[in-house]
Image (spheres, grey):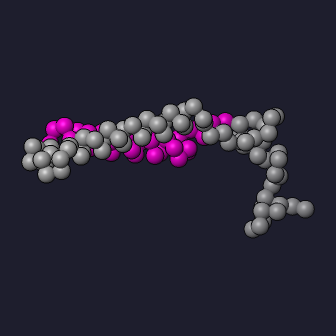
Amino acid sequence: MSEAGTPTKRAGLFDLRWVIALLFGFYGIVLLVVGIAFTTEADTAKAGTNLNLWSGLGMLGLAILFAAWAQLRPLRVPTAASEGAATGPADDADGAGER
């Protein structure tokens, strides 16, 4: 976490949880549509259940959990002004800066 006086901002879409939520949500919707519109009785009888439908619902549920987690507990990153002031310039290969 950041120190008490350090200004921070939300990471937004750079937070990996949002990327995971979007991907699971997209594929969940695709599977849900396939499960509802394109699954035949023969497919359901072969597997015993409509796997596309239930997998799509599970993926949508997981996407909602990841989105809620990212929204309720956002990733905070320090602002550019506070980064430069704390570390100073780093202009050589090992990041040591001028000494």
Query: Which quarter of the figure has residue 25?
Result: top left
Whether residue 61 is visible, yes or no, is: yes
Q: Is residue 43 above or below residue 79?
A: below
Q: Which residues are magenta?
A: 9-38
Q: Which residue is painted at 43% across and 35% down in the image?
A: 64
The image shows residue 87 at horizontal and vertical percentages of 81, 51
Magenta residue check for 10: yes
Q: Which residue is outermost to the front? A: 48
Magenta residue check for 5: no
The image shows residue 46 at horizontal and vertical percentages of 13, 51
Quadrant containing the N terminus in the rendered view: top right
Q: Which residue is painted at 80% across and 35% down in the image?
A: 4
**Of the pair 60 and 48, the residue shown nearer to us:** 48
Q: Magenta segment, principal secondary structure?
A: helix
Query: Which quarter of the figure has residue 75?
Result: top right
Q: Which residue is painted at 77% across and 62% down in the image?
A: 95
- Looking at the image, residue 42 sits to the left or right of residue 13; the answer is left
